[in-house]
């Protein structure tokens, strides 16, 4: 039962009376209405329920409501399974049944989408264990006020479930330990998943094909690992109308990043298993695009490699030739993401004839400093396109901020011993974006840097610690908008 805080005062009466709970009871439980605040309350006939505060009623608050409810259900189930004071059959009942959530009378599409995302993602867990999986909440029944409301809101909830599915898959892939997740495993897993969705095609290119076709950046980065690189291609043709845009999505797929010879500090390096979060977001988005049957041609390219230290690792000072023939002077082997992305962008332009390019990567630590851990940065060749990305993210519950592509630094990207320099001095996020722009062929393009929000260290709203799956549902909503 949602309790909304308006100007600091909880509105308790109406929602509580529906379930037969006195407002005084809730005040005694110190219910404040803060977003995501959960209180267990007694109900008639020996039942129990929760109040969940919805704060200011914003979309973010409703994601917090859904997530808090999912986490409360998990805690209750685990309590029952551990022999706590919950009813003996609670764990079994909730594992196969559902919880009921009565929507407020003013429920609209935005509220229902946000609530669905919170319910679906707030209790996400990834754990490799010998213990049996704990009981979990399988279904939540959202109860609308009228039949007309239910009919209007049902497709909204269904679409939000696909957003959540894309996000959860991106989390799964990024959280998978890198002793399992090498480039071959990641590419093969994505191709297998694509095979289960009608109309979605996937092709895995191996190191021999990459060598024969001149993917120098991918081969350089992957050369230090005993587990060779891959390129994943996914294709969805949602229309036979040639006038509809062809969108190409490119996702960074570094399955583990030591930094190479420019070695990273040991502290925090374990999280580099998530350095393919951009690629995971693209894979999750492609499956959702196909399941939703969006009327757009979409191609996804995910260059995959491990960046390791060995006698065959690439070096600072090397000159690498990319797919499109451009040469890059390497300055720092820890700036490996832009090396593999450059190949994929060049291949997109020359091999797939796109109308629009979007790339996604955990690319620069500078973006974490600039925007923190909850907002992604958008660099674009067209301001209107950056705004489309931001608006798509707002609809899907992900926050983006437009960043400048400063022309003052263009000459800094020019190389002395090659066409371009990989990691010139200057503002890190801007320099990386300007480098990538060199490979976009002048097409409408957006670069999404998710180094900050791609990972989390604590719960907030529908996010849990670990990989967040950030950008997956923004991509789905962006593609849907381009299809319109």
Image (cartoon, rainbow, N blue to C red):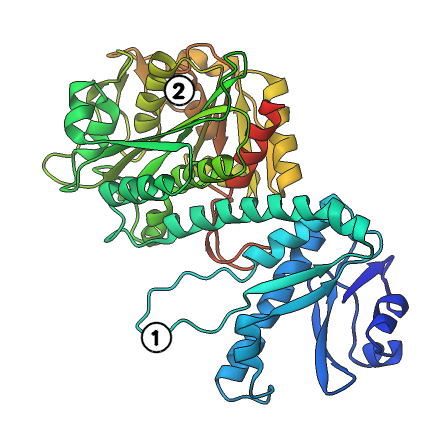
Q: Is residue 461 something that shows in the picture?
A: no
Among the 4 quarters of the image, the one containing residue 292: top right
Q: Is residue 282 something that shows in the picture?
A: yes
* Quadrant location, the N terminus: bottom right
Q: Are marks 2 and 1 in contact (CB under 8 Å)?
A: no
Residue 334 placement (x, y as % from top left) = 30, 35
Vertical placement of 265 versus 68: above or below?
A: above
Q: Secondary structure at mark 1?
A: loop
Judging by the rendered image, the residue that carries numbered circle 1 is 131
Residue 435 has which mark? Answer: 2
Residue 14 placement (x, y as % from top left) = 89, 67
Which residue is at the front of the view, 335 or 174? 174
Vertical placement of 433 versus 87: above or below?
A: above
* Quadrant location, the C terminus: top right
Q: Residue furthest left?
A: 311
Q: Is residue 416 left or right of residue 12?
A: left
- In front: label 2 or label 1: 1
Q: Residues within 10 Å of mark 1 (few under 14, many from 20)?
A: few
Marks 2 and 1, how far apart in space?
47 Å
Residue 230 placement (x, y as % from top left) = 24, 34
At horizontal 20% and vertical 18% (from top left) the residue drawn is 213
Q: Residues within 10 Å of mark 2 (few under 14, many from 20)?
A: many
Q: Secondary structure at mark 2?
A: helix
Among the 4 quarters of the image, the one containing residue 85: bottom right
At horizontal 64% and vertical 25% (from top left) the residue drawn is 387
Which residue is at the front of the view, 446 or 74? 74
At horizontal 87% and vertical 73% (from top left) the residue drawn is 17
Residue 339 has which mark? Answer: none
């Amino acid at each position: 039962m949602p309790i909304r805080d308006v100007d600091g005062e909880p509105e308790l009466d109406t929602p509580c009376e529906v379930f037969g709970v006195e407002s005084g009871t809730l005040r005694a439980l110190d219910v404040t209405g803060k977003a995501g605040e959960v209180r267990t309350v007694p109900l008639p006939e020996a039942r129990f329920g929760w109040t969940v505060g919805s704060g200011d009623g914003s979309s973010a608050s409703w994601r917090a409501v859904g997530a808090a409810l999912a986490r409360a259900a998990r805690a209750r189930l685990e309590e029952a399974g551990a022999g706590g004071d919950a009813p003996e059959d609670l764990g079994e009942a909730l594992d196969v049944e559902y919880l009921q959530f009565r929507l407020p009378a003013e429920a609209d599409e935005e509220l229902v989408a946000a609530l669905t995302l919170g319910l679906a993602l707030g209790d996400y867990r990834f754990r490799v264990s010998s213990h049996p999986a704990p009981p979990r909440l399988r279904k939540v029944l959202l109860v609308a006020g009228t039949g007309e409301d239910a009919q209007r809101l049902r497709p909204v909830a269904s679409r939000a479930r696909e957003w959540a599915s894309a996000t959860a898959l991106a989390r799964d892939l990024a959280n998978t330990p890198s002793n399992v997740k090498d480039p071959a495993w990641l590419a093969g897993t994505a191709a297998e998943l694509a095979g289960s969705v009608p109309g979605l095609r996937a092709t895995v290119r191996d190191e021999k094909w990459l060598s024969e076709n001149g993917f120098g950046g991918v081969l350089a980065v992957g050369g230090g690992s005993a587990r060779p690189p891959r390129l994943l291609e996914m294709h969805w043709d949602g229309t036979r109308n040639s006038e509809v845009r062809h969108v190409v999505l490119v996702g960074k797929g570094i399955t583990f990043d030591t930094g190479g010879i420019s070695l990273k500090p040991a502290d925090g390096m374990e999280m580099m298993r998530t350095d393919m979060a951009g690629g995971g977001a693209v894979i999750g988005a492609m499956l959702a695009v196909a399941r939703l049957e969006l009327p757009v041609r979409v191609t996804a390219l995910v260059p995959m490699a491990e960046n390791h230290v060995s006698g065959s690792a690439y070096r600072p000072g090397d000159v690498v030739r990319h797919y499109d023939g451009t040469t890059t002077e390497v300055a720092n082997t820890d700036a490996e993401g832009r090396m593999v992305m450059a190949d994929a962008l060049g291949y997109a332009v020359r091999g797939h004839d796109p109308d629009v390019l979007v790339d996604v990567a955990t690319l620069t630590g500078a973006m974490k400093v600039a925007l923190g851990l909850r907002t992604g940065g958008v660099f674009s060749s067209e301001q209107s396109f950056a705004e489309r990305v931001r608006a798509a993210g707002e609809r899907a519950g992900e926050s983006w901020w437009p960043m400048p592509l400063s022309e003052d630094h263009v000459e800094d990207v020019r190389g002395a011993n090659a066409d371009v320099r990989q990691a010139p001095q200057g503002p890190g996020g801007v320099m990386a974006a300007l480098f990538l722009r060199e490979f976009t062929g002048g097409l409408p393009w957006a670069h999404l840097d998710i180094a900050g929000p791609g990972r989390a260290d604590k719960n907030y709203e529908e996010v849990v610690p670990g990989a967040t799956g950030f950008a997956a549902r923004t991509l789905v909503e962006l593609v849907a908008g381009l299809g319109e």
